[in-house]
Image (cartoon, helix red, strand yellow):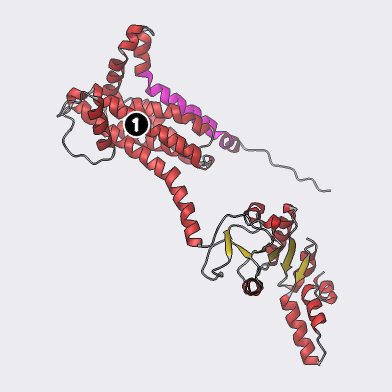
């Protein structure tokens, strides 16, 4: 018995393993720092009724002095738990916000150098460990996107109300504030309401950038995966997720597989193909599942457990053998049929114990030799040689 000694994990590997937690903590701290000015003003007067009454003025002051930092801080605090859960959506939102913060830091002179340097370091970490944030869920992404959209709309409505006197047409009611927010976020810009002061212009810029950020994140994490899945089903044309039983599953598009499908369909049998990429060479009336045929989940998707037979008729003997192993893991009633293309692999394929082994190339060679030597070939011997290859060939294969 040979024992394999595992190599000790390097320091970088350890950092990479927990990088999502470090980045989430850094984003949380960065968000709290960006909300520091508002927090300091709230702490100065304590949490009293007077403080709550002055809360709109405090928020307005924070918006004017650095509105982009305030809303960025809110988003970073909200997205930090998502980063800890390796959410791809949270990574996209935080990355875009960090890029915007860096761009504004470069364009505004009164921003602290240390803050900008930390933002650059955060962006570098997000890029370096981007592979750690691979968890995608349409449901979770929809919740994050919807929440982010409401936050941006609230930021736009409250900000335009607090700074209403700094626009060409004063904004004094919720209806006008909501209208201005939607027009600005959509970058339509009718021109009926526009900022007239530098602070208002900076606020409008931050609203446009945040609107585009949230919209882009929603498109990339919710809509695109959904459309991609629908497009794959459309291009496949025949791929359907349905419960079937008593059908035949063929895990290849080889000539043998296509001919077998045609013969089965002529006998009124249902056939389902498993292929890695869709194509036009498959029969129009055959069901198709796109995926790896050696993956047990793909076989489940093709209702392999209730199939009459799972036939690995590909041109690669190793893949055919792995298909048989995956089919046996289903523990269903389906028979396993495997094709052997190379005589040398016959004994190896038989070790996975398929229910039936066919070797068309071996059969072709035997029939040719028998015809040339004048041997008689009966129907029974032909069938026996097809599904039970010659014993001498098995010995040569070993």
Q: Can residue 214 be seen at all in this image of the molecule?
A: yes
Q: Where is residue 392 in the image (x, y as percent from the top left)?
A: 84, 76
Residue placed under numbered mark 1 in the picture: 152
Residue at figure coordinates x 47%, y 53% from the top left: 230
Q: Can residue 68 be seen at all in this image of the molecule?
A: no
* Residue 240 in the figure: left or right of residue 3: left
* Residue 296 in the figure: left or right of residue 186: right
Q: Where is residue 256 in the image (x, y as percent from the top left)?
A: 65, 73
Q: Which of 125 and 21 is in front in this view?
A: 21
Q: In which quarter of the image is residue 361?
A: bottom right
- The answer to whether residue 79 is magenta is no
The quarter of the picture where the C terminus appears is bottom right
Q: Quadrant of residue 264?
A: bottom right
Q: Is residue 294 above or below residue 97?
A: below
Q: What element carries label 1?
A: helix
Residue furthest to the front: 268
Q: Position of residue 376 (x, y in %)?
A: 82, 89
Residue at figure coordinates x 27%, y 30% from the top left: 178
Question: Principal SS element in the magenta part?
Answer: helix
* Residue 319 in the figure: left or right of residue 224: right
Q: Which of 326 and 94 is in front in this view?
A: 326
Q: In this view, does 36 lie above or below 128?
A: above
Q: Position of residue 345 (x, y in %)?
A: 75, 68
Number of marks present in the image shown: 1
Residue at figure coordinates x 53%, y 32% from the top left: 84
Q: How crowded is mark 1: few (under 14 residues within 10 Å), some or many (20 or more)?
A: many
Stretch in magenta = 16-37
- The answer to whether residue 20 is magenta is yes
């Amino acid at each position: 018995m040979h024992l394999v000694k595992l190599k000790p994990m390097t320091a970088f590997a350890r950092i990479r393993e927990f990088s999502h937690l470090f980045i989430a903590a850094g984003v949380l701290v960065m968000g709290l720092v960006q909300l520091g000015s508002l927090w300091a003003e709230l702490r100065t007067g304590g949490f009293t009724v007077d403080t709550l009454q002055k809360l709109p003025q405090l928020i307005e002051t924070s918006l004017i002095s650095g509105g982009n930092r305030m809303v960025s801080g809110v988003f970073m605090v909200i997205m930090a738990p998502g980063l800890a859960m390796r959410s791809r959506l949270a990574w996209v939102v935080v990355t875009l916000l960090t890029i915007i913060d860096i761009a504004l830091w470069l364009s505004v002179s009164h921003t602290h150098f240390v803050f900008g340097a930390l933002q650059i370091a955060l962006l570098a970490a997000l890029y370096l460990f981007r592979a750690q944030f691979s968890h995608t869920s349409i449901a979770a992404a929809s919740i994050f996107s919807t929440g982010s959209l409401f936050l941006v709309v609230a930021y736009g409505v409250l900000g335009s109300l607090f700074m209403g006197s700094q626009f060409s047409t004063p904004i004094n009611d919720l209806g006008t504030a909501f209208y201005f927010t939607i027009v600005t976020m959509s970058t339509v810009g009718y021109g009926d309401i526009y900022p007239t002061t530098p602070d208002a212009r900076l606020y409008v810029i931050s609203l446009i950038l945040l609107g585009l950020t949230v919209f882009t994140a929603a498109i990339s994490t919710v809509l695109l995966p959904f459309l991609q899945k629908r497009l794959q089903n459309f291009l496949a044309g025949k791929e359907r997720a349905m419960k079937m039983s008593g059908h035949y599953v063929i895990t290849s598009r080889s000539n043998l597989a296509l001919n077998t499908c045609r013969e089965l369909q002529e006998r009124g049998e249902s056939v389902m193909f498993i292929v890695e990429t869709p194509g036009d060479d498959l029969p129009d009336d055959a069901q198709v599942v796109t995926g790896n045929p050696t993956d047990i989940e793909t076989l489940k998707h093709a209702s392999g457990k209730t199939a009459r037979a799972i036939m690995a008729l590909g041109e690669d003997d190793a893949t055919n053998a792995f298909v048989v192993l995956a089919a046996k893991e289903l523990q269903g009633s389906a028979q396993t049929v495997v094709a052997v293309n190379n005589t040398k692999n016959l004994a190896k394929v038989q070790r996975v114990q398929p229910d039936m082994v066919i070797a068309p190339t071996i059969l072709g060679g035997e029939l040719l030799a028998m015809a040339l030597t004048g041997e008689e070939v009966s129907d029974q011997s032909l069938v026996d040689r097809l599904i039970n290859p010659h014993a001498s060939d098995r010995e040569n294969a070993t």
